[in-house]
Image (cartoon, rainbow, N blue to C red):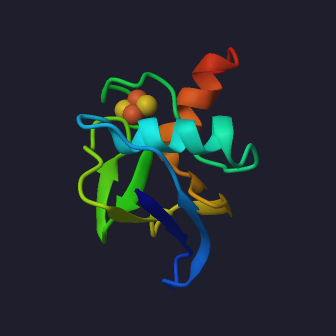
Amino acid sequence: MWVRIRDRAGAVVKSYDVAHEAGESVMNLLDRIRGTIDPSLAYYASCGTGKCGVCGVVVDGTPRLACTCPALGDEIDLAPLPSGEFVRDLLTINPVNRREADHRDGGE
Ligand code: FES
């Protein structure tokens, strides 16, 4: 499957040809890319079950949770969420993942 990473303006900034199995989520693809192709790929992940809400990305033009969004078809476009502080690739800091990170680090 071709995975294209776009910036907030819609330009393709990275693309990957990654193995894909039926039933996998977008998060599965991101984990495989980071584990086998590009360890620098940045995105946010935590629970992996759709509960914490930190893994939001834009999938083919629609904001979704990467861990619960099925990876369908032969190609997929991913982009950072349009709100929040953009960090890099698909990583943005928003109130949801800021709270999760604070909690994990022992803060409020
Ligand atoms: S990682 Fe928690 S909702 Fe996706």
User: From the viewer's perspective, is residue 68 above or below residue 77?
Assistant: above
User: From the viewer's perspective, is residue 88 above or below residue 67?
Assistant: below
Residue 82 is situated, as x and y percent measured from the top left of the image, at: 45, 69
Residue 51 is situated, as x and y percent measured from the top left of the image, at: 31, 25
User: From the viewer's perspective, is residue 80 above or below residue 42?
Assistant: below
Q: Nearer the viewer, residue 78 or 8?
A: 78
Residue 44 visible (yes or no)? no
- Quadrant of the rendering where the N terminus is positioned: bottom left
Q: Residue at x 63, y 27 (%)?
A: 102
Quarter of the displayed picture in which ligand 1 can be seen: top left
Q: Nearer the viewer, residue 81 or 66?
A: 66
User: From the viewer's perspective, is residue 70 above or below residue 49?
Assistant: below
Q: Residue at x 71, y 49 (%)?
A: 38
Judge left or right: residue 25 versus residue 40.
left
Q: Nearer the viewer, residue 91 or 14?
A: 14
Q: Residue at x 63, y 63 (%)?
A: 86
Q: Residue 23's image quarter?
A: top left
- Quadrant of the rendering where the C terminus is positioned: top right
Residue 60 visible (yes or no)? yes
Residue 99 is situated, as x and y percent measured from the top left of the image, at: 54, 32
Q: Residue 21's image quarter?
A: top left
Judge left or right: residue 90 versus residue 27.
right
Q: How many marks?
A: 0
Q: Nearer the viewer, residue 108 or 1?
A: 1
| Farthest residue, direction top | 106
